[in-house]
Image (cartoon, helix red, strand yellow):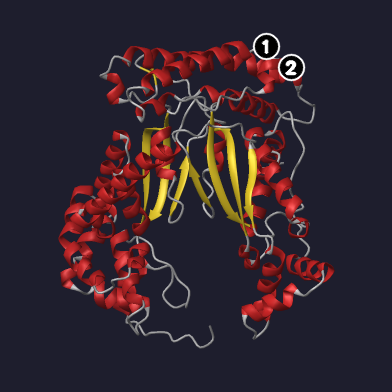
Amino acid sequence: MSDFFQESLTEQESRLLQPFVTNLDRPVFGFRNLPEVVKGALFSRYSRSEKGLRRILLDEFIKAPEADFAGIVGSASGNQADQLVAIQKAEAFYDRVLIGYGDDSVAELGGAHLACEGVSNIAAKALEDSRLGISPLEKSTRYVPFNKKVNGRYLYYREPAIMVSSHAARYEASLDHLFDTYTALIDPLISWVQACTPKEESTSERAYASATRAKALDLLRGLLPMATLTNVGLFGNGRAFEYLLVKLAASPHPEVQELGLAMQQELDQMIPSFVKRAKTERGQAYVRYLADNGDRTAALTQKLTADLKTDASAMVQLVEYDPNAETKIVAAILYPQTNLGFDQLNAYAAELSAAAKLEIINTYIGDRAVRFHRPGRAFEETYYSFDLLADLGAYRDLHRHRVLSQERQRYTVQHGYAVPPELVAANLAAPYCQALDRAAETAELIGQDLPEAAQYVVPFAYRVRWRMKLNLREAYHFIELRSSRQGHSGYRAIAQAMYQQIQTVHPALVAKMHFVDLNDYALERLASEQRLDAKLQQMQPPLSS
């Protein structure tokens, strides 16, 4: 930083820049009050110019008449229509700036926040399937009851193909029954939870009410069907959005295709230069490629596996791991500290005793005081593959992890459903199971005519099979986070089983995975709510004397 070259600015230039940069004279600064199309084009020039970024903004944008910079930025807080016209007028200029950079990574320099409201869980999972470049946030089934009605109707997606078929009445009746049951069981289940876990004197009414309500909603979420409408917020870069739009267009679900078109329309107003290829012939060719390959692969798979029978599976199965993991990780630990080649270090590590390897591994991990102290990149050298069979509610929670590979099978009722033992103890399991059984019959009946659309009927309680592949470094994060007390019991059991199975094959590598919680709790959220109380108390202004 001491050798930072400060580009000189005139008083007028400083005035021009001041609204758009966080400072005028320090080597680290940020941008503000700039549309994404400007920021993306600005950064794309950065790597091919000897100028500093402030000077590029001045010379090539603010002072460039063809950029219409004043038109875009000047109307940013004014009339939206004026801003859209200005952006469209200037788009050709920014395209010329960007066109010299053939690398698709340039499209990662512009981003957008997007809200997708009133979409089904089928569509929500399609949005969240994008692992990299997209950060999703979805409406919670733990904190929000999903029994609201609008104009006398529950909020679930009425799939068009079903609604024009002979199945329409049965579809609505089955889903209404699921929501009716969900609604009817909330209050008695909260009462039962509170009776089983009386409030302690040290616990506030707010924390207790929130924790017991969350527990009840957690137990009942299995009744919610995949048609349930939810809200998803997304932040992503242009490149990720462009690929997401292509994938949505290739979906077999009309709702998902229409959602992609609606997203394209809004992104065209925010980052048009970065998502325009999704609607070009190149983008449409990609859509056809994905859709056609998916159809052909599905047809071939059905042909080849038609005679195979589904067998019972454990909830969590470690299906693949590297028997040489310790040796490879030791070599990876040593590598950045030497001038030796990786093959040479791998051979050296292979000759070390188990005790020597353990010393290197434990030294590298160090003393982990909290779970946020994660091992370094050497732990990315080995991978674990799991085959998982668990309820859709647990899948939805675990699906959001980004730094791993997940791929699911179809939403189906063929694997049966899970009944929370608390519902049995509360004598509320009978209506719960009756609603699920009725939904299964409807899903199978619709599936004979409309197999894709039938997935909307499947409730969260039914099991889905999916595979997960993750490296050891991510396993530390995933398992310690998802086994923590405040988590849902469904996915806590998965994280706990993953830990135990990795421990069986590689005990030395997880010896310092100290923050795996193997306990069970009556009120998972209570401790978190109590910590929130403490924070709220600290935020209270002191009483005046």
Q: In the image, 70: left or right of 105?
A: left
Q: Which amino acid does label 2 sit on?
A: Ala
Q: Residues within 10 Å of mark 2 (few under 14, many from 20)?
A: few
Point 65% across, 64% down: residue: 379
Q: Is residue 409 visible?
A: yes
The residue to which callout 2 is attached is 195
First of labels 1, 2 by sequence position: 2
Q: Quadrant of residue 174?
A: top left
In the displayed structure, 43 sits above or below 273; it is below
Q: Which amino acid does label 1 sit on?
A: Asn
Q: Is residue 77 visible?
A: no
- Give the mark toward the camera: 1 or 2: 1
Q: How crowded is mark 1: few (under 14 residues within 10 Å), some or many (20 or more)?
A: few
Q: Is mark 1 on a helix, strand or loop?
A: loop
Q: Quadrant of residue 92?
A: bottom left
Residue nearest the viewer, comparing 417 with 183: 417
Q: Where is residue 18 in the image (x, y as percent from the top left)?
A: 36, 69
Point 79% across, 31% down: residue: 202
Q: Where is residue 179 in the image (x, y as percent from the top left)?
A: 47, 17
Q: Where is residue 146 in the image (x, y as percent from the top left)?
A: 48, 24
In the displayed structure, 125 sits above or below 329; it is above
Q: Where is residue 143 in the image (x, y as percent from the top left)?
A: 56, 31
The residue to which callout 1 is attached is 427
Q: Distance between the residues labelled 1 and 2?
A: 14 Å
| Quarter that holds the C terminus | top right
Q: Quadrant of residue 49?
A: bottom left
In the displayed structure, 411 sits above or below 512; it is above
